[in-house]
Amino acid sequence: MLLASDTLRDKFESAMPYEQFVAYGEPLGHRGPWDDRYGRLALKPDEQAMVSGFQRDMNVLCLTGTWCGDCALQGSAHARIAEANRARITLRFLQREDAHADLIVKCPINGGFRVPVTWFLAEDFEPLTVFGDRTLSRYQSMALRALGPEANVHAPPPEDPLATVLREVLEQYERAQAMLRLSPRLREIHGD
């Protein structure tokens, strides 16, 4: 699922910042869920401090859809996290459409072309990791609803599903930052 850095750089450069992406869906009536989720999400002070302490630049590219509810939630979580360290995190969004079919067909998830799919990239667009489509808590909640006790889910539904998804997305950022910080290649470049 990891693509060449040149491909990801080209896609990143054509992608939209959060507000532009949300506005892109407005004529289709898609803005409401994005604004709602964005307004209901906030980092806790310790999470804010952790993100503001990131020391390596990262580029984050989300292939998503303005029409998708899970995308609105994760996209808003990404936006809130990126706002906590604009100096180190550059976040961009691509609408899932034919113009990006080359990304879609190279990144199937469980045999399907799903959204959201997020690439975490180093400062030079070398791929670190791919995250998609739903978070664990979303799958647990869906499994409980669809399968009942047979779901064999070991966690109760979260008291605050939005905050739980924000935390799960934040864990992806923390993991990517640790990868960047510990990278021998980047430590040599930065002399640390």
Image (spheres, helix red, strand yellow):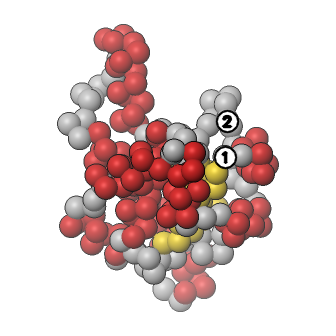
Counting from the top left corner in percent of width and height, residue 46 is at 22, 66
Residue 41's disc number:
none
Q: Residue at x 69, y 52 (%)?
A: 2
Labelled pair 2, 1 in contact (Cβ < 8 Å): yes
Residue sitting at the far bottom: 191
Residue 106 visible: no
Give the structural element (helix, strand or loop) at label 1. loop
Question: Disc 2 or disc 1, which is closer to the eye?
Answer: 1
Q: Residue at x 78, y 51 (%)?
A: 99
**C-alpha gap between disc 2 and disc 1:** 10 Å
Q: Is residue 70 left or right of residue 121?
A: left
Give the structural element (helix, strand or loop) at label 2. loop
Counting from the top left corner in percent of width and height, residue 82 is at 43, 67
Q: Is residue 130 left or right of residue 47?
A: right
Q: Residue at x 61, y 37 (%)?
A: 114
Kind of residue indicated by mark 2:
Phe
Counting from the top left corner in percent of width and height, residue 55 is at 43, 79
**Disc on the earlier residue, 2 or 1:** 1
Q: Residues within 10 Å of mark 2 (few under 14, many from 20)?
A: some
Q: Which residue is mark 1?
A: 96
Q: Which residue is mark 2?
A: 113
Kind of residue indicated by mark 1:
Arg
Residue sitting at the far front: 27
Q: Residues within 10 Å of mark 1 (few under 14, many from 20)?
A: many
Q: Is residue 59 above or below residue 164?
A: below
Q: Is residue 30 left or right of residue 111?
A: left
State which quadrant residue 62 falls in.
bottom right
Looking at the picture, tell me which residue is in the foreground, 173 or 29: 29
Residue 124 visible: yes
